[in-house]
Image: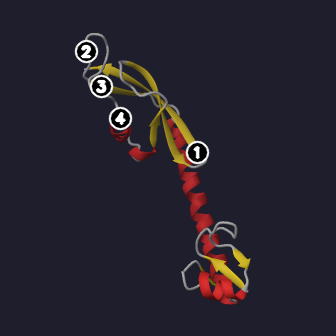
Amino acid sequence: MEVILKQDIKQLGEKDDIVNVKPGYGRNYLIPQGFATLATPSAKKVLAENIKQAQFKQEKIKKDATELAGKLESIKLTIGAKAGESGKIFGKVNSIQIAEALKTQGYDVDRRRITFETEPKTVGEYIANLNLHKEVKVQIPFEVVAE
């Protein structure tokens, strides 16, 4: 019996795979639990179309991320923070401040995609990592200055 998996199932397959299973396993477990549907010819055509559309969307997202990465490579940010005489800042610089600084320069980047190699806790230069896509990553240098 052929079924199309709706989600990843350990030791059977991943989402959108067409797999052969024993009829009892498919009828009594996979289909009633919502883990799979019957692999009819029409369901296979719908699956093929969905995969093609999802692939097209992923390519477009990756292309946009690559373009944005090319623009972001030449940027250097300056973040102002209150600091003591020793150079230690009060609090810390976080991804929200980096995202706002990028937004003021015209780049809209989600703050959850920004990470740091080392947490900025003193005045100085640091690097922020932007994960624009699972295959596209950019490093942006920024400087923390005392206000």
Q: In this rendering, which labeled residue sits more in front, label 4 or label 3?
A: 4
The amino acid type of the residue labelled 2 equals Gly
**Can you see residue 109?**
no
Name the image colouring.
Answer: secondary structure
Closer to the N terminus: mark 4 or mark 1? Answer: 4
Closer to the N terminus: mark 1 or mark 2? Answer: 2
- Label 4, residues with CA under 10 Å away: few <14, some 14-19, many ≥20: some
The amino acid type of the residue labelled 4 equals Asn
Closer to the N terminus: mark 2 or mark 4? Answer: 2
Q: Is residue 56 left or right of residue 116?
A: right
Q: In this view of the protein, which residue sits in the foreground, 105 or 62?
A: 62
Q: Which mark is residue 94?
A: 4
> Which residue bears the numbered disc 3?
80
The amino acid type of the residue labelled 1 equals Val
Point 51% across, 46% down: residue: 132
> Which residue bears the numbered disc 1?
136
Position of 138 relative to 40 (above/below)? above
Point 46% across, 27% down: residue: 118
Q: In this rendering, which labeled residue sits more in front, label 1 or label 2?
A: 2
The answer to whether the residue labelled 4 contacts the one labelled 3, judged by CB atoms less than 8 Å apart, is no
Q: CA distance from mark 2 to mark 4?
A: 18 Å
Point 61% across, 68% down: residue: 8
**Can you see residue 50?**
yes
> Which residue bears the numbered disc 2?
84
The amino acid type of the residue labelled 3 equals Gly
- Label 3, residues with CA under 10 Å away: few <14, some 14-19, many ≥20: some
Where is residue 122 drawn, in percent x and y?
36, 19
Where is residue 16 drawn, in percent x and y?
64, 73
Closer to the N terminus: mark 4 or mark 3? Answer: 3
Q: How many marks?
A: 4
The answer to whether the residue labelled 4 contacts the one labelled 1, judged by CB atoms less than 8 Å apart, is no
